[in-house]
Image (cartoon, rainbow, N blue to C red):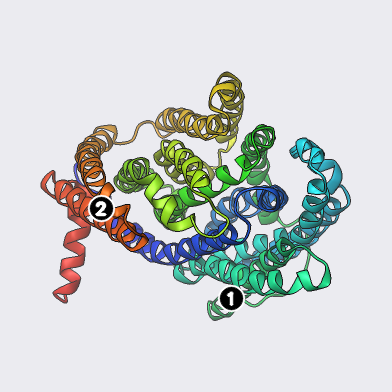
């Protein structure tokens, strides 16, 4: 393979569409985090919110945006390709009813056993007066979020398979919008009735989850889907989805064990550690979403269709091109975040209750999280390939390897580095998982174009290194000037990002990265009307 896959244009166009929508969502997500930082800072109330939201959020990873999403798209694509529209829509309705029932029971159990779950997740909260009680209240309020977000994931899977990417990707913007507007309004109102302001933000999260589902329904109807409620536990399509999900849920549960372990360790560190980790991780989700998740969402239907038609040659080249695009975007993002971490955190979060010390701690944490950005985004692309091949045991094994590595790394480093050990371990374990899955997938596919992939990676690393050197020099040169006011800080940061990006793009063009040249030609031909 000496040229990009024929699917590169399709994947890139879809990924570009998703990226724009995800970027809107991530920007609103940062605004949401700014609201939290300004109103609550890093400490008592926000620590409680983070831990309370972590429980339904990690279940969301299992049921919605992780196992369910990939398994559903794989089976739905097969039905859509080989079984006709009637059987396809019947499967979608059956899955929605099944999910609504099961997740309602899970939500009820979560609310009933919230105390026990929290004592496992953050036992040290009980040492601070009122903190555990507040966390329990927030947990009960936010648990139904799981139902809304899981049904939204099914709607997204249907729309993506039908070539509709923008609306489902924009849906998460409505989640953030509902969280901000509804949450802030209630946060200002509820203290008048004796409730903490953070309770309003919890209700805002629930409002946002409902909006994320609701805004996809009109587009879903326009694709021809009509919801006909019925439950058939013997449906072979439903059984196949559950069969694909089961090992994936086990594998993703390993990831959640990591989150559980990390939260437990963070809760035992200095007050504010949970908040610093969350603010940093939320920010690193921006490039992961804009680049890794966008490419993954765009790639999955293409990969699934090639798997359904047994076109393995096209599957391999599509995968290699998608991974090259991910490297091209995430590696320079990693370099930029490491060098510019503190200026970024200072501008975005250091307002109101968020102090300069919080900026220092969060910035250092962000730099460590960024080390694993390329691996995190790449795994998002790799795991759906295993789904498409109906083989999910290797992602399970990789996840449990990551759990063991995570615990060992944290135990070895937490006494010295405190909460930063958790961020470092997260990056290391994700890289280990990436290397393991890469090796297995290469053997499972009987090889894919490694020479092409490494050539592209070499060009990306060279351009990113040059960009990193430039950013270090320009950031050091502008530091004294930027320190004289907030507006100067913003100008200096934007100038560094814009010129660094331009330098990186120019170098990749000169190095003739195939994907970049291919996409440039596509854009130019469209502008010329061809």
- The reply to whether dot 2 and dot 1 touch (C-beta < 8 Å) is no
In the rendered image, which quarter is residue 255 located in? Answer: top right
- Which residue shows up at 35% across the image and 31% down it? 447
Query: What's the distance in space between the residues labelled 2 and 1, CA to CA?
Result: 45 Å
- Residue farthest along the right direction in this orientation: 112
Q: Is residue 280 left or right of residue 325?
A: right
Say what secondary structure mark 1 lies in.
loop
| Residue 226 coordinates in the image, percent (x, y) | 64, 78
> How would you rate the neighbour count of disc 2 (Cα within 10 Å): few for under 14, some for 14-19, many for 20 or more?
few
Q: Is residue 509 left or right of residue 151?
A: left
- Residue farthest along the front direction in this orientation: 484
Q: Is residue 84 visible?
A: no
Q: Note whether 485 is above or below 267 in the view shown.
A: below
| Residue 90 coordinates in the image, percent (x, y) | 67, 68
Assign the N terminus to one quadrant of the image.
top left
- Which residue shows up at 20% across the image and 39% down it? 459
What residue is pinned by disc 2?
481
- Which residue shows up at 33% across the image and 35% down it? 448
Question: Which of 447/371 is in front?
Answer: 371
Question: Which of 293/33 is in front?
Answer: 33
| Residue 501 coordinates in the image, percent (x, y) | 24, 53
Q: Is residue 462 left or right of residue 217?
A: left
Question: Which of 13/178 is in front?
Answer: 178
Q: Which mark is residue 215?
A: 1
In the rendered image, which quarter is residue 482 located in? Answer: bottom left
Circle count: 2
> How would you rate the neighbour count of disc 1 (Cα within 10 Å): few for under 14, some for 14-19, many for 20 or more?
some
| Residue 28 coordinates in the image, percent (x, y) | 50, 66
Q: Is residue 93 visible?
A: yes
Q: Is residue 19 left or right of residue 65?
A: left
Question: Which of 64/87 is in front?
Answer: 64
Query: Does label 2 or label 1 sit earlier along the sequence?
Result: 1
């Amino acid at each position: 393979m000496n040229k990009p896959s024929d699917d590169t244009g399709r994947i890139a166009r879809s990924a570009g569409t998703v990226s724009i929508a995800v970027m809107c969502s991530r920007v609103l997500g940062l605004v949401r985090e700014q609201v939290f930082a300004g109103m609550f800072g890093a400490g008592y109330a926000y620590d409680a919110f983070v831990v309370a939201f972590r429980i339904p959020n990690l279940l969301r990873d299992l049921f919605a945006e992780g196992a369910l999403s990939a398994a559903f798209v794989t089976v739905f694509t097969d039905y859509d390709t080989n079984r006709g529209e009637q059987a396809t829509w019947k499967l979608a309705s059956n899955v929605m009813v099944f999910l609504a029932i099961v997740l309602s029971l899970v939500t009820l159990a979560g609310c009933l056993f919230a105390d026990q779950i929290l004592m496992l997740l953050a036992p040290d909260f009980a040492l601070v007066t009122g903190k555990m009680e507040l966390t329990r209240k927030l947990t009960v309020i936010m648990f139904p979020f799981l139902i809304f977000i899981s049904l939204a994931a099914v709607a997204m899977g249907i729309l993506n398979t039908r070539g509709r990417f923008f609306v489902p990707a924009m849906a998460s913007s409505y989640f953030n919008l509902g969280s901000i507007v509804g949450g802030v309004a209630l946060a200002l109102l509820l203290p008048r009735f004796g409730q903490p302001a953070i309770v309003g933000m919890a209700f805002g999260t629930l409002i946002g989850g409902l909006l994320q589902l609701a805004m996809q329904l009109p587009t879903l109807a326009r694709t021809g889907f009509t919801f006909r409620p019925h439950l058939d536990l013997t449906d072979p399509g439903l059984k196949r989805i559950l069969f694909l999900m089961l090992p994936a849920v086990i594998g993703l549960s390993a990831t959640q064990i990591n989150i559980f372990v990390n939260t437990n360790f963070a809760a035992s560190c200095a007050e504010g550690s949970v908040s610093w980790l969350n603010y940093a991780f939320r920010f690193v989700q921006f490039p992961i979403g804009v680049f890794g998740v966008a490419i993954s969402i765009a790639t999955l239907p293409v990969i699934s269709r090639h798997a359904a038609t047994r076109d393995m040659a096209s599957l391999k080249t599509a995968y290699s091109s998608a991974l090259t695009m991910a490297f091209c975007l995430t590696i320079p993002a990693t370099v930029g975040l490491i060098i510019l971490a503190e200026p970024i955190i200072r501008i975005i979060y250091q307002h109101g209750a968020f102090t300069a010390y919080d900026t220092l701690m969060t910035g250092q944490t962000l730099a460590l999280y960024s080390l694993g950005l390329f691996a995190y985004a790449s795994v998002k692309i790799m795991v759906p390939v295993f789904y498409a091949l109906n083989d999910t045991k290797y992602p399970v094994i990789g996840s449990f390897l990551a759990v063991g590595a995570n615990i060992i790394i944290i135990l070895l480093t937490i006494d010295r580095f405190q909460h930063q050990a958790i961020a470092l371990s997260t990056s290391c374990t994700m890289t280990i998982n990436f290397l393991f899955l890469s090796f297995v997938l290469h053997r499972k596919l009987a090889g894919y174009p490694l020479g092409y992939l490494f050539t592209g990676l070499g060009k990306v690393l060279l351009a990113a290194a040059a960009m990193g050197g430039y950013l270090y020099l320009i950031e050091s040169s502008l530091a004294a000037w930027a320190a004289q006011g907030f507006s100067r800080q913003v100008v200096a940061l934007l100038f560094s990002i814009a010129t660094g990006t331009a330098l990186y793009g120019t170098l990749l063009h000169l190095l003739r990265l195939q994907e970049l040249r291919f996409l440039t030609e596509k854009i130019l031909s469209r502008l010329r009307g061809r």
